[in-house]
Image (tube, grey):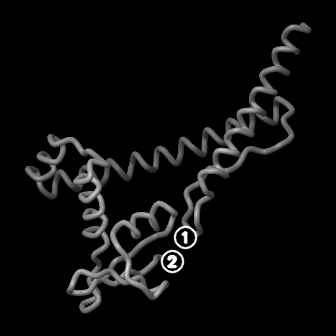
Amino acid sequence: MAYVIKRYSNRKLYDTQESRYVTLEEIEEMIRAGKEIAVVDAASGEDLTSVTLAQIILENERNHRAALPTAFLHQLIKHGEAWQDFVQRSMKSSLEGIVSSQREMERIFQDWASRAGWGMSAPRVEPRRDGAAEPDAEQLREEVSTLRERLRSLEERLEKRKNQK
């Protein structure tokens, strides 16, 4: 279920689940944490989600955190809806490809790990859709470190087996 943010005529944004006003930066943080956001006009109920997300992207651009190429932005404006539809379809296709590649990579890694005698299964890599918070950075660093150590151990075992033959 999406978090509902109401936008009032004075441009204030109100998080209905937390019962408090929020900023664009806080909405960006919610999205990065895996929450699905829906922004609606408080008076009319009109969906303002895409406008608000575009505003977040533009704020990042202004702060030089995103740095979209100027030529790309010119083309986006110049060709209007047709270009925007193309970009939207392309981005959706690219994201689906990334998720598919992640799943395939995970499957191959688990297959390889089981053939190598690695008893532990690899952690699943899937985008969160339930609104739950993602693991924090420190936890992810620890998991990566553990995986690297396991990989080193497997490489050593493989090298030993190769030298024994």
Between 103 and 123, the one lying in front of the other is 123
* Residue extending farthest right: 164
Image quarter where the C terminus lies is top right
Between 20 and 143, the one lying in front of the other is 20
The residue lying at 15 percent from left, 40 percent from top is: 71
Q: Which residue is mark 2?
A: 1
Q: Which residue is mark 1?
A: 131
Residue 64's spot in the image, x, y percent?
27, 48
Residue 127 shown left or right of residue 115 in the figure: left
Judge the density around disc 2: few (<14), some (14-19), many (≥20) Cα neighbours within 10 Å.
few
The residue lying at 42 percent from left, 72 percent from top is: 37
Q: CA distance from mark 1 to mark 2?
A: 7 Å
Q: Are marks 1 and 2 in contact (CB under 8 Å)?
A: yes
- Identify the mark nearer the N-term, 1 or 2: 2
Residue 24's spot in the image, x, y percent?
33, 69
For residue 46, above or below residue 95: below
Q: Nearer the viewer, mark 1 or mark 2?
A: 1
For residue 57, above or below residue 144: below
Judge the density around disc 1: few (<14), some (14-19), many (≥20) Cα neighbours within 10 Å.
some
The residue lying at 70 percent from left, 45 percent from top is: 143
Tell me the number on the disc at residue 4.
Answer: none
As shown in the figure, which amino acid type bears the numbered disc 2? Met
As shown in the figure, which amino acid type bears the numbered disc 1? Gly
For residue 83, above or below residue 26: above
